[in-house]
Every structure is written in C-alpha cells, then in structure tokens.
Amino acid sequence: MKVHEYQGKEVLERYGVRTQRGIVAETPQQAGEAFAQLGGDLAVVKAQIHAGGRGKGGGVKLVKSRQEAEEVADQMLGMMLKTHQTGPEGQLVRKVFVCEGLDLAQELYVGIALDRHLGQPMLMVSAEGGVEIETIAAERPEAILKLPINPLRGLEPYQARRAAFFLGLSPALVKKAVPFLVGLAKAYLELDCEIAEINPLVITEQGEVVALDAKINFDSNAMYRHPDVAEMRDESEEDGKEVEASRFGLNYISLDGSIGCMVNGAGLAMATMDTINLHGGAPANFLDVGGGATEEAITEAFRIILSDPNVQGILVNIFGGIMKCDVIARGVIGAAKTVDLHVPLVVRLEGTNVEEGRRLLAKSGLDITSASSLDEGAKLICQAVQSAN
Ligand code: GDP
Ligand code: MN
C-alpha cells in the first residue's frame, strides 16, 4: 500500500525522524494560508500523487510569497502530472503539500527495502542523493553502502554510525544522523513497510539532518495490525478495477494485455498467464478468485474484467478441489447471463464433478468454448482473439 509524501512524513515524525514539515492544501487559498502559517520567506509547493520524480515533471516548486504559493498551487491542483513513474496520461493532482523552504547544503540518499535474497531488510545509503538509486546502482554500485538489518534487533547504532561515516558526515552531523537512521529502521520494522526511501535526505546550511522527501510503502497484508496506517489509504490514487476487486475479496491486478483471466489460486493464475504468453497472447490481468468464490464473486469478477476496454477474450481456468466444478459452472453461466458478455469465453474446468460442470456449460446455450487442459484453453483463447483482429 502506497501513501502520500505528507502521510509518510507524518509517520516518520512519530519515530523521531526529522522531516521537512508542511501543511496540506486542497485549494490555492489554503496553499496561500499555509505559506503564511509556515512563517518563512521560502516554501515549496509539492504535488501529492503516488509517484516519484515529481520534481522533474513540474510537481515541486519553490515559492517566495503567499501570492506565489497560491498561483503555483492553482497551476498544480487539477493538473495531470506526468513523471517517469506515472502512466503516459499522468496522475491527477488533488492535493499539494506546502513545506518549509530549506537551504540545502547537501542531498543524500537513504532507503530501506527488503532484500529477497537475504530475507532481511537492507539499509542503503549513498552520498549521491536526488538521483534515482537504480541509476546509481547500475552506474556506480560502489557509491552505495548496503547494510542488512536484523529484523529482531533492528538497525544497530554501530551500523548507523558506519552509514553516517560512509556518507562523509562531520562528527556533529553523525550525532544527528544516527538517531535519524535508527528511527527510520524502527518505523520500517514496526509498521511492516515494504519500502522506506528518503531521497533526498538533506543536510541544511544550518547543519540539520532532514528528510526532504518520503516514499513509504506498506505491506497491504499487514495492515490489519496497523489500523491507523490503513486509514491513510487513498483509493483515488489506485487502479479503480483493483479497488473494486478488493471489496469482493478478489486478488486482481490489472495488466496491459488483451486476454482477461479468471483463475482460482495464485500459482495457477501465474501458470495461466505464462501459458497465454506461450501461445502468443498477453494477459489483461492477474485474478485469483480464491478457493471459496461464490456465484456473486464470480459475477463481479466478470464485470471487472469486462470493464477493461482492452479485453478481447476471457479464459476461465478453475481447478475444483475444495470447490466443485458444477458449482463453478453455475457461477460462470449465471455471470455470463447477467453481464453483457461481448467477447469470446473459453472455460477450462478440472476436478470434482467435472462431468456435471461441463454438461451444464454445454447445455447453457451460451457461446462458451470448453477446453480440457490449460494448454488447450490458452491456445483456444489466443486463437479466438487473434482471429477477431
Ligand atoms: P520527487 O522529485 O518526487 O522525488 O520530489 P522531492 O521531494 O524529492 O523533491 C525534488 C527536488 O526538489 C529535491 O531533490 C530538491 O532538490 C528540491 N527541493 C525540494 N524541497 C526543497 C527546499 O526546501 N529547498 C530547496 N532548495 N530545494 C528543494
Ligand atoms: Mn524524491
């Protein structure tokens, strides 16, 4: 789960991590008031979207007066901000974060992410802040120091000192950087983060260590443990189809191909997507309807798949283990009748009561092609979509 920069900073402040503070504004007038309230003669107006790279896209602007803050907010609010992390159409800016303007002496990089190879969170620091870490990792890997974090003990103070020395900080700054890094790691572990990235971490002219930006992603599956964090979810930033699906307990992820997939079980869903690719097609989504999908959930799944204008065919691939194939067939038939099914549908059923399931599909009068194996099902739907083009 992603949150906005202002929310990430709010979370970090709870852990004693000093951030560039600000006030959220939803109108130009509020942005002007925020400038006045901050009380300085320099502020930064920052577009709040769930994507980075805002600076280069025109989503981060320095302002020197209340009037300028209003003008900049007026331009930003409602704009479709395009960055390398948004789609080509960009993302709508609904809020701006008006932050205290800082005099930057140095921009550094600090991030924590899960190292899947080690199975541990990894602290990464680099003196080359403001640049994307992927770029540094590719071009100058020696400019990054990586330190694994013990998930039980957290980041040890000696590790934090090592990181601070690697960044070339003076003794006075090391003293400030250590609690900053330890606090960041504590937040990461306690709140089940997936990523906690501060880019840039800045040293101000006044000698303060401040998080200028905050990209905090949380593990969605752990949000039941953190109801206060879960409340920060902003569904308007997420894919509408994915939000709908989550309401029905469906694991749906939209992709950019043309073949809608409806599968039970995540592993089978992955295998189905691979097999579609093998036969020259491209999946429009990942969808795991789960082990106990009801007719209602299956109808909903069809509706969500069909609401994607790129979908030119659907492959249903269900293994009736706990579920029975005749129940699934009834669900598919019911759903196909309720929604306007305007694309070819291939169904592959296997498992308990499979004969009854196939018989129900055959006599339903619907234009459904039955397949007896995953390979055949994938081949048939790819052919149907290709011949329609
Ligand atoms: P991103 O582009 O989405 O990652 O947004 P950031 O929050 O990282 O801001 C982008 C850049 O704006 C930073 O790298 C800074 O160079 C600049 N910036 C942001 N706030 C300030 C500020 O208070 N003072 C100065 N001088 N520059 C700032
Ligand atoms: Mn940034």
Image (cartoon, grey):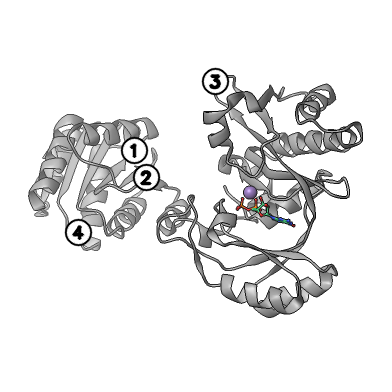
Q: Which mark is residue 117?
A: 3
Look at 53% across and 30% down and name the residue there: 139
**Residue 156, position as x, y percentages in the image:** 81, 24
Counting residues from the start of the chain, the first of labels 3 and 4 encountered is: 3
* Residue at mark 1 to residue at mark 4: CA–CA distance: 20 Å
Among the two numbered marks 2 and 3 on one chain, the one whose residue lies closer to the N terminus: 3
Foreground residue among 161 and 139? 139
Contact, mark 1 vs mark 2 (Cβ under 8 Å): yes
Q: Tag 4's secondary structure?
A: loop
Q: CA distance from mark 1 to mark 3?
A: 28 Å
Pointer 1 residue: 264
Q: Secondary structure at mark 1?
A: loop
Which amino acid does the dot numbered 2 rest on? Answer: Ala
Answer few, some or many: residues within 10 Å of disc 4's Cα (few below 14, many 20 plus, some between 14 and 19): some
- Kindly identify which residue carries mark 4: 341
Element on which disc 3 rests:
loop
Residue 60 in percent (x, y) is at 63, 60
The 10 Å Cα crowd at callout 1, few under 14, some 14 to 19, many 20 or more, is many
Closest to the camera, between mark 3 and mark 4, is 3
Q: Which residue is mark 2?
A: 293
| Number of the label disc, if any, that sits on residue 251 | none
Mark 1 or mark 4: name the one nearer the start of the chain: 1
Q: Position of residue 180 (x, y in %)?
A: 81, 39
Decide which of tag 1 and tag 2 comes sooner along the chain: 1
Looking at the image, is mark 1 or mark 2 nearer the viewer?
1
Left or right of 243? Residue 217 is right
**Residue 233 at x, y percent in the picture:** 60, 55
